[in-house]
Image (cartoon, helix red, strand yellow):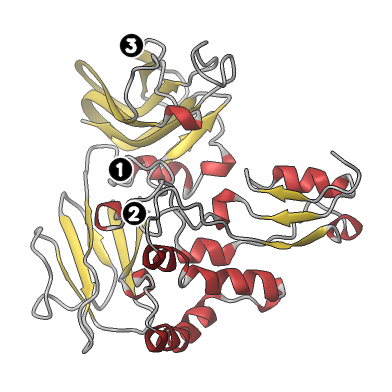
């Protein structure tokens, strides 16, 4: 680096941290928190075309630009933050407004507020006043913040997926579980929903000014759903999201690996043990992977299943190898399933091999690739 260089840290935070240690001024603008060309919702089918990614308002607000790994003296080189809006996919000024508002408001508090003064719930309580100003000025802003927020929590104790719903202004929420679109006549949400079977859950917030967008999710229960699960090799910290339970929460990911429906493994394999909690007859295990070759996200190179009665001594019942990806292979979701003679077992170990050396045709040749997996389905 030139002696007087200021560093923009946009491929994550690592470069900014290293630059500050070398006494260079730094602007923190990591894509993982501050790329406003990323989608604001998982429901990308109902959004203007975007470049990909997933960056909701709460994740922008959660960013802390002062790395804890720096000493107070090194932290002085962190001069501020910046959000980026790349416009390859944004043809109009109205679309640009939609991408930045109200995420700009969250960025402002990231920049101007001391960490101990930041409070997302307080921010949300003040946001409607700011949005009144957007309305008065005729700005085209994103309204996702007024949608129903749904939290999905696997509950191994009850064997249920617990769904907790909320809105920014405590508007009444109505829901359905049969795939129909909810209305003000649908059941009123009053306490967490405990789901034990395959349903299509949908919810809306009902307001005098109009109903919110529908939030919807399908559950996919199998014998592994909501069961205790442990990782025998690490989950990648950058893409851990809610961790191992993501693989048994009954929720499937779409083609966007950053939504939190997928978790990643890097420089090691996916190696998980699931406790079915009692001897259970099984005859198949399936996983889904998400591939985005340009982002170094590749398919699995193999899949194997082992079973055990005590959780210590395992016997392999099925395995399969997959070829290295070709340049012509599509991005998206890949399904892998192993079927075998029925066996009764309590513990199931599922191993998916990651790509340890990307092929010669790839810009990252010989480097390891990320492996993104969502649901482990046992039947």
- Residue at image coords 83%, 58%: 75
Where disc 1 sits, the SS reads loop
Residue 109 lies in what quarter of the image?
A: bottom right
The CA distance from mark 1 to mark 3 is 24 Å
- Residue 155: mark in rendering: none
Q: Which residue is mark 1?
A: 254
For disc 1, the neighbor class at 10 Å (few under 14, some 14 to 19, many from 20) is some
Q: In the image, is residue 145 above or below residue 202?
A: below
Residue 91 lies in what quarter of the image?
A: bottom left
Task: Name the spot of residue 179 as percent of width and height, x first.
Answer: 10, 58
The CA distance from mark 2 to mark 3 is 32 Å
Q: Which residue is mark 2?
A: 42
Q: In front: mark 1 or mark 3?
A: 1
Q: In the image, is residue 262 above or below residue 272?
A: below
Q: Where is the C terminus found, in terms of image quarters?
A: top left
Position of 41 with respect to 297 (left or right) is left
Task: Name the spot of residue 378 as percent of width and height, x first.
Answer: 26, 31
Exactly how many numbered labels are in the figure? Answer: 3
Q: In the image, is residue 310 above or below residue 18?
A: above
- Residue at image coords 91%, 58%: 73
- Residue at image coords 73%, 56%: 27
For disc 2, the neighbor class at 10 Å (few under 14, some 14 to 19, many from 20) is many
User: Looking at the image, is mark 1 or mark 3 earlier in the sequence?
Assistant: 1
Position of 234 with respect to 321 (left or right) is right
Q: Which residue is farthest front?
A: 92
Say which of 128 and 132 sits in front.
Answer: 132
Q: Which residue is mark 3?
A: 320
Where disc 3 sits, the SS reads strand
Where disc 2 sits, the SS reads loop
């Amino acid at each position: 680096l030139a002696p007087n260089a200021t560093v923009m840290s946009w491929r994550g935070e690592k470069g900014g941290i290293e630059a500050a240690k070398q006494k260079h001024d730094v602007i923190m603008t990591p894509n993982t928190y501050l790329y406003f060309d990323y989608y604001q919702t998982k429901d990308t089918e109902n959004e203007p075309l975007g470049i990909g990614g997933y960056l909701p308002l709460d994740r922008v607000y959660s960013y802390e630009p002062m790395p804890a790994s720096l000493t107070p003296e090194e932290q002085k080189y962190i001069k501020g933050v910046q959000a980026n809006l790349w416009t390859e996919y944004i043809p109009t000024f109205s679309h640009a407004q939609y991408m930045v508002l109200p995420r700009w408001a969250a960025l402002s508090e990231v920049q101007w507020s001391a960490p101990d003064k930041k409070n997302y719930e307080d921010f949300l309580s003040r946001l409607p006043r700011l949005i009144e100003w957007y309305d008065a000025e005729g700005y085209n802003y994103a309204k996702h913040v007024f949608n129903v927020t749904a939290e999905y929590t696997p509950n191994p104790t009850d064997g249920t997926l617990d769904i907790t719903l909320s809105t920014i202004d405590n508007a009444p929420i109505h829901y359905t579980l049969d795939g129909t679109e909810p209305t003000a006549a649908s059941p009123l949400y009053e306490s967490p929903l405990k789901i034990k079977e395959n349903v299509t859950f949908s919810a809306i917030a009902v307001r005098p000014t109009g109903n919110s967008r529908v939030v919807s999710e399908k559950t996919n229960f199998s014998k592994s759903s909501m069961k205790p699960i442990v990782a025998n090799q690490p989950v990648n910290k950058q893409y851990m999201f809610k961790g191992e339970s993501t693989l048994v929460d009954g929720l499937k990911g779409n083609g966007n690996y950053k939504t939190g429906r997928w978790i990643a493994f890097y420089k090691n394999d996916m190696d998980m043990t699931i406790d079915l909690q009692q001897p259970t007859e099984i005859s198949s295990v399936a996983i889904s992977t998400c591939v985005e070759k340009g982002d170094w996200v590749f398919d699995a190179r193999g899949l194997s299943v082992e079973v055990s009665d005590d959780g210590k001594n395992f016997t392999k019942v099925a395995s399969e190898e997959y070829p290295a990806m070709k340049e012509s292979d599509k991005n998206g979701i890949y399904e892998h399933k192993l079927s075998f003679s029925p066996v009764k077992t309590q513990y199931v170990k599922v191993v998916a091999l990651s790509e340890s050396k990307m092929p010669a045709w790839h810009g990252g040749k010989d480097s390891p690739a990320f492996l993104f997996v969502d649901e482990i389905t046992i039947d």
